[in-house]
Amino acid sequence: MTEFANAMEVFKLLDKSNCRKCNEQTCLAFASRVFLGERALNECPVLPLEILEQYRDKQKKKQTRQEYRESFLAEEKEKIRALDLEEAAKRTGGTFSQGRLTLRIFGKPFSIDQNGDMYADIHINPWVAAPVLGYVMRCQGPPDGPMGPHAGTQGRPGEKRPLCPAFGKSLKK
């Protein structure tokens, strides 16, 4: 069984008495919290047991930030597996060698293998890994004209560097 589609789907199951026995102001507020995964359906004390059993598997579990970050990075790595890294190296201005795409980010070489695993001389935090993987997947190549400065993609003055829509726009003068 899939998760609830919206809060109204949960609300329809409730008695709509606004009894406040669940410590919410209204049944709709309770339904919204259940839909968001912040409350469990069985926290409504007046809901019949048959309904609780029937809809037990539809409840969403709220993810922690760490769980969300891990699942997001796993999805991004899965997309990298389907990517041609050699072609991505051409689009991003990186190099491809020994099965790895290497980009200079923050002045340091960052390499990505076909599994989406990243290698660098410095620690790679998840908040750095996610934008880098996104850049590799979505960068469209060099823009027409000079590009404005961007940390890690700056080259020598006048050098054209690849543009990624996620990181900014080309600055045409």
Image: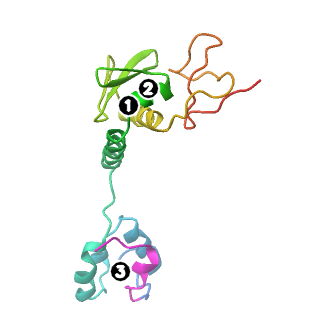
Indicate the quadrant containing the C terminus: top left, top right, bottom left or bottom right: top right
Say which of 59 and 143 sits in front: 143
| Label at residue 85 | 1
For the record, the magenta segment spans 1-15
Element at badge 1? Answer: helix
Q: CA distance from mark 2 to mark 3?
A: 59 Å
Image quarter in which the N terminus is found: bottom left
Residue found 31% across the figure and 35% down from its top: 116
Specify the label residue 116 is tagged with.
none
Question: What is the crowding at mark 1: few (fewer than 14 residues within 10 Å), some, or many (at least 20)?
Answer: many
Q: Quadrant of residue 122?
A: top left
**Residue for point 38% across, 34% down:** 84
Task: Decide which of tag 1 and tag 3 comes sooner along the chain.
Answer: 3
* Residue type, label 3: Lys
Of pointers 2 and 3, the one earlier in the residue sequence: 3
Q: Which residue is denoted by mark 3 in the rendering?
A: 21
87 or 32, which is in the foreground? 87
Q: Secondary structure at mark 2?
A: helix
Q: Residue at left 34%, top 47%?
A: 75
Tell me: 3 left or right of 159: left
Residue at 45% x, 35% y is 131
Callout 3 environment at 10 Å: few (<14), some (14 to 19), or many (20+)?
Answer: few
Across and down, in percent, residue 49 comes to 23, 86
| Residue type, numbered disc 2 | Ala
Spatial CA span between label 1 and label 2: 6 Å
Q: Which residue occupies the extreme right position in the image?
A: 173
- Which residue, given by chain and number where applicable, does mark 2 sit on? 89
Instruction: Give the x, y percent position of residue 74.
Output: 31, 44
Question: In this orientation, does residue 25 appear?
Answer: no
Q: Tags 1 and 2 in contact by the CB under 8 Å rule?
A: yes
Is residue 77 on the magenta stretch? Answer: no
